[in-house]
Each structure stands twice: as structure tokens, then as C-alpha cells.
Image: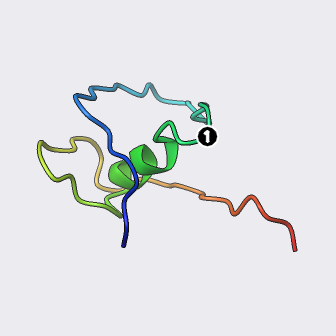
Amino acid sequence: MTVRGRLEDVTISIPRGVTAILGANGSGKTTLLKLAARLLKPDRGSVEGPRRVGVALQNPYLG
């Protein structure tokens, strides 16, 4: 897997009921969600939170 960018020095607290993460292309939304869902392991630091997380990643291309 090739990683183009990276998140650095991120601390985030997501309150209950949040249903969307918004940001510009390439801002790290997918990386953040994959880390939260433990689909990726951080190179440094840790991910804290519930062990069971629901994430729906969508392909932007309609076929």
C-alpha cells in the first residue's frame, strides 16, 4: 500500500451522534476514519476509543 500523506499531531474527540466528517480532498478524512475503525495502524502514538466502530466508506465513482 502506498500512503501519499500523513496525519501529524492529531488529537480529536468525536461526540456521540456525529454522522459525517467533512473536509477538502486530501485532508485525511479517510485516513482518520480508517484509523478509528482500526483498519490502519498508526506509525506512532495510539488510537483510543470503542473497539467496535461503524464506518461506511464510499467509492465516489458511479458505474
Picture residue at 33% right of the left edge, 26% below the top: 12
- The reply, left or right, for residue 37 in relation to residue 43 is right
Picture residue at 22% right of the left edge, 28% below the top: 9
Kind of residue sitting beneath label 1: Asn
Residue toward you, 36 or 10 = 10
Picture residue at 15% right of the left edge, 44% below the top: 46
Which SS class for mark 1? loop
The C terminus lies in quadrant: bottom right
The quadrant holding residue 4 is bottom left
Give residue 20's position: percent from left, percent from top.
61, 36
Picture residue at 49% right of the left edge, 55% below the top: 54
Give residue 26's position: percent from left, percent from top.
53, 42
The quadrant holding residue 52 is bottom left
Residue toward you, 60 or 4 = 4
Give residue 36's position: percent from left, percent from top.
35, 48
Give residue 55's position: percent from left, percent from top.
52, 55
Q: What residue did someone put label 1 on?
A: 25
- The reply, left or right, for residue 48 in relation to residue 35 is left
Residue furthest to the right: 63
